Amino acid sequence: MDAKALCVISPAAIGPDYFREAFGLLNAAAGGPPDKARMMEIMRRHGLTPAAPPPT
């Protein structure tokens, strides 16, 4: 059974620095995919646990 969820986190929960760093990474990708390893590093540093991608 597959499930999808949308989680909304305000800056008050993890801090505005996470959003600034994530925006910088996404902006640097210039419309292409962001550097996944860098995004995971940003997430971990701010206390988030990235979910593993679904098996193909």
Image: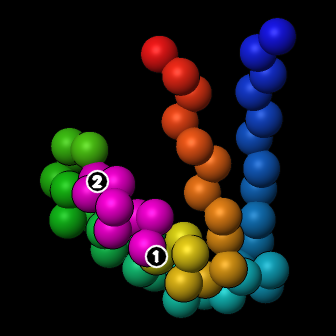
Name the residue located 75 percent from the left edge and 27 percent from the top edge: 4
In this picture, residue 8 sits left or right of residue 34: right
| Magenta-colored span | 34-41
Measured Cα–Cα span from mark 2 to mark 1: 12 Å
Residue 6 image point, x, y percent: 75, 40
Q: Quadrant of residue 39?
A: bottom left
Residue occupying the point 60% across, 57% down: 50
Tell me how the rendering is colored: rainbow
What number of labels is visible?
2
Q: Is residue 46 above or below residue 33?
A: below
The residue under label 1 is: 42
If the image is split into quadrants, where does the N terminus sit?
A: top right
Secondary structure found at label 2: loop
Q: Amino acid at mark 1?
A: Ile
Residue depicted at x 76% and y 15% = 2
Instruction: State whether the magenta stretch is mostly helix, strand or loop.
Output: helix
Q: Where residue 5 sits in the image (x, y, percent)?
A: 78, 35
Residue 29 in magenta stretch: no
Q: Is residue 54 left or right of residue 30?
A: right
Q: Which residue: 34% across, 61% down? A: 37
- The residue at which mark 2 appears reads as 34
Give the residue type at disc 2: Pro
Q: Position of residue 47 (x, y in %)?
A: 67, 80
SS of the residue under disc 1: helix
Mark 1 Cα shell of 10 Å, populated few (<14), some (14-19), many (≥20): some
